[in-house]
Amino acid sequence: MPKDDPRRHYIGVRSSNVDGDTDSYMGSSKQLDLAVAEYSVELKKTVLAYFTSREEANITESEMLNEIDAAKDDTYFN
């Protein structure tokens, strides 16, 4: 599963004072952690949006995950 593999995705909210493009945090998904351990690859992170509040970010994350039905889509680690 190379880092540019378009078949797997993870969408998540990150609150930090560090710039999103330089922040090394990749997410809290246990499935994601297992995949990284199994395939020993570097992941590619794409910042989809910046928000002024955590609440706004959480709402948008929920809407995105519902829209793509990530819970039932095995191409997502969510």
Image: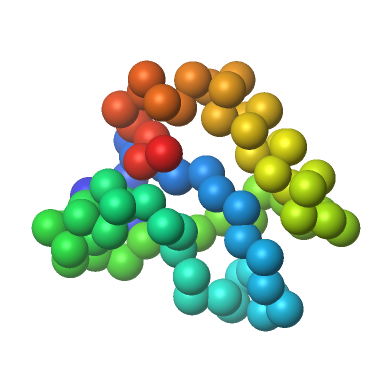
Q: Which residue sits at x=58%, y=22%?
A: 66
Q: Quadrant of residue 71?
A: top left
Q: Nearer the viewer, residue 10 or 21?
A: 10
Residue 22 on image: x %, y %: 59, 77
Does residue 23 appear to the left or right of 35 in the view shown?
A: right
Residue 36, given in percent of the width and then of the height, sits at 24, 60
Q: How is the image coloured?
A: rainbow
Up-down relation of residue 40 to residue 50 (above or below): below
Q: Residue furthest front?
A: 55
Q: Could you tell me if residue 6 is visible in this image?
A: no
Relative image position of residue 19 (x, y in whole percent): 69, 75
Please identify the quadrant where the C terminus is shown.
top left
Residue nearest the viewer, comparing 28 with 47: 28
Q: Residue at x 56, y 30 (%)?
A: 65
Tell me: 14 left or right of 32: right
Image quadrant where residue 42 sits: bottom left
Query: Considering only vertical position in the picture, is 43 above or below 70?
Result: below
Report whether residue 58 is seen: yes
Q: Position of residue 17 (x, y in %)?
A: 72, 78
Relative to the observer, which residue lies in front, 71 or 35? 71
Which residue is at 45% across, 45% downward? 10
Vertical position of residue 43 compared to residue 62: above or below: below
